[in-house]
Amino acid sequence: MSALETVEERAAQWARSLRLRVLSALLDLGFLGYLWVAVSLSYSYFRFGRIQYSFFPWTTMLGVIVPMAALWSAWDQTVGLKVVNHVLRGGPASRRLVYALTWPLFPLTLLTAFVDPKGRSPAELLSGLTLSEVTLVVHRSWYRTLTGWLAGFALVATLAAAVGITRVDPSRLVTGFEKTLKFWRAIASPKWDLLGLGLRLIGETVFMAIIATASAVPFAVVLSFLAARNLMQGPVARPIYTVLRMVGSFTRSVDAIIWAIIFAVWVGTGSFAGVLALLVHSIVDLMKLYAEQLEAIDPGPVEALTATGANRLQVIRYAIIPQIINPYISFTIYRWDINVRMATVVGMVGGGGIGFRLIQYLRGWAFQEATVLTILIILMVWLLDWASARLREKLA
């Protein structure tokens, strides 16, 4: 074995050791730190009626959770060890105690893992114990393990903390009911004079969805071929695929409401801003759906045509498009259905359509007028959902 191969092997062993020892330790500390915060939130809310993330300085928290993580690692398969699929095998209690006492030295694994042939941590070297990969999984009831109890306790603490953070108080449903009487009376007596205006706004909302979907399809179709892993192979194609996927993930993570606010500032409030917001979201969403369909095609026809000497365009025309045309149409109808619903929501932040007028009525406490628009929205969504489902069944 050459010196270069030896160095490469040692570097690979070092990287693997860090993943096993350092990553698992950080995960355990993170889990226990989260548990500390969740318990503090729960106790402070239910005991004092206020939110407090810690009753002690953060240095005190570290002084507690580090020994807890050390003892946990010495006597049970922790959350971090479960993630890396390893466990501390065998050894008497005295050696496990040495392992627990020296476990906080895990950052020094950066050095010991490169020197030790097995890539062990300081705690393993000093205690004589070694982390071993779990090859035979022995299922035990959660209440028979420390990790199970900690996980259950973390779940309870999380739910309790969620109640405190969100200020859930069911009694307010009773004490505040009187404030809603005006709203319930308005529902019982909607102002039907607005029916004509409501129908016009419904039409505007539907056509916002139509133009956004229709405009998004050509862009999404082209981009889907560039975002399909099986079609984008090679030194030039793969970076294009990676960039498109990253941009698509980022764009989808920004909600359509945020895009509507951006475009409302950009082009002014109204239907155009709403269409642009739906358009951006539709392009990246359809691109992902279309690309995943391309990645799931049967490669047989593609290979057969390629073997006959067909060029790239001929392969796409005769081997790929016949497999994707119906799913593409189905995804497009589904996206249009989504856009109709979203058009109402983006309208509430300045995107036009029926949502823009509805939020104005609600802000002005004009509940009779808002009730008419709400009824129309419900009917519109129900009818379009029914029609969309029937069309997709035909294409299935």
Image (spheres, rainbow, N blue to C red):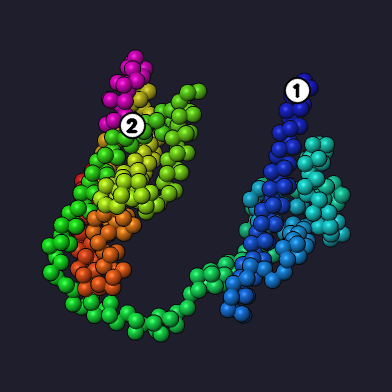
* Foreground of the two, 252 or 263: 263
Q: Residue at x 81, y 40 (%)?
A: 111
The residue at 12%/69% (across/down) is 193
**Range of residues picked out in magenta:** 305-322
374 versus 276 height, above or below: below
Quadrant of the rendering where the N terminus is positioned: top right
Q: Position of residue 163 (x, y in %)?
A: 52, 72
Report the residue marked by disc 2: 222
Quadrant of the drawing holding the C terminus: top left
Q: Mark 2 falls on what kind of element?
A: helix
Question: Circle 1 is placed at which residue position?
Answer: 4
Q: Main secondary structure of the magenta part?
A: helix
Mark 1–mark 2 Cα distance, whole angstroms, equals 46 Å
In terms of image quadrants, where is residue 117? top right
- Specify the amino acid type for callout 1: Leu
Q: Is residue 378 visible?
A: no
x%, y% of residue 256?
Answer: 37, 51
- Direction from residue 151 to residue 246 in the image, left or right: left
Picture residue at 19% right of the left edge, 68% below the top:
372
Earlier along the polypeptide chain: callout 1 or callout 2? 1
